[in-house]
Image (spheres, grey):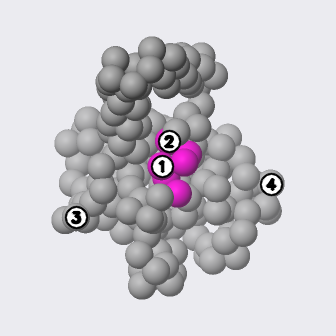
Amino acid sequence: MSECTVLTLNEKLNNDDINLLDVREYAEFAGGRVEGARLLPLGDLEKRHAEIDHSKPIYVMCRTGNRSGQAQQKLKNLGFKDVINVQGGFEAWKKEDLPYEKDEKAPWALERQVRFVAGLFVLIGFALSVLVHPYLIGISVFIGAGLVFSAVTDTCTMGLILAKMPWNRRPVSCEQTAVNS
């Protein structure tokens, strides 16, 4: 599989006509992205791949390079030939102190939202166990067990649920320009 560094991508953006797809979720994309990147979340690739220009090389980026690697494989399976995964993703881009843009009113990053909600549930579970019934400590235990499961399996059900919340969805007025711009 083809890969490139963020420095190589930066050169390509300045000199070549390429497609740069960002396969993160809207909240992540709104919080910071490479100028000119087009949002096409990983989960939407199969149903929206026809929106991608086949005639140009496709550079795929996410937060760290994991989801973009999955996207690269999906696009190859869908018949795209020239698909390049950006190593290290947006985190590597920021680490190299390369310029980026973000929405003024971007929602919190999903990871931050997960920490907030998990902490809130733990506190509520504890308070309810003290004030209402001791068995309600189970709420805190359930959240703790979920966090351990999330770490072991490297999945996050709470994050997937939060990503679908209205504040984490791209405004409908922006949907048409997300990939076609």
Of the numbered discs 3 and 4, the one sitting upstream in the chain is 4
Q: Position of residue 67 (x, y in %)?
A: 57, 43
Using residue 108 as the reference point, say whether residue 79 is left or right of it. Answer: right
Q: Which residue is mark 1?
A: 162
Circles 4 and 1, Cβ within 8 Å, touching? The answer is no
Mark seen at residue 159: 2
Residue type, mark 2 in image? Gly
Question: Magenta region: which residues?
Answer: 159-164
The answer to the question of whether label 1 and label 2 lie on touching residues, with beta carbons closer than 8 A, is yes
As shown in the figure, which amino acid type bears the numbered disc 4? Asn
C-alpha separation, residue under disc 3 versus residue under disc 4 = 36 Å
Mark 4 and mark 1: Cα distance apart in space: 29 Å
Q: Which label sits in the foreground, 3 or 1?
A: 1
Residue type at mark 3? Answer: Lys
| Residue 22 percent location from the top left of the image | 48, 57
Q: Label 1 sits on what residue type?
A: Leu
Sooner in the amino-acid sequence: mark 4 or mark 1: 4
Q: Crowdedness of circle 2 by 10 Å Cα count: few (<14), some, many (20+)?
A: some
| Residue 23 numbered tag | none
Q: Secondary structure at mark 4?
A: helix
Q: Quadrant of residue 57?
A: bottom right
Mark 2 to mark 3: distance in Å?
A: 20 Å
| Residue 86 seen anywhere in this rendered image of the structure | no
Residue placed under numbered mark 4 in the picture: 77
Instruction: Identify the residue at image location x=30%, y=56%.
Output: 107
Q: Nearer the viewer, mark 3 or mark 4?
A: 3
Residue depicted at x 34% and y 17% = 130
Look at mark 3 in the image and give the residue it sits on: 105
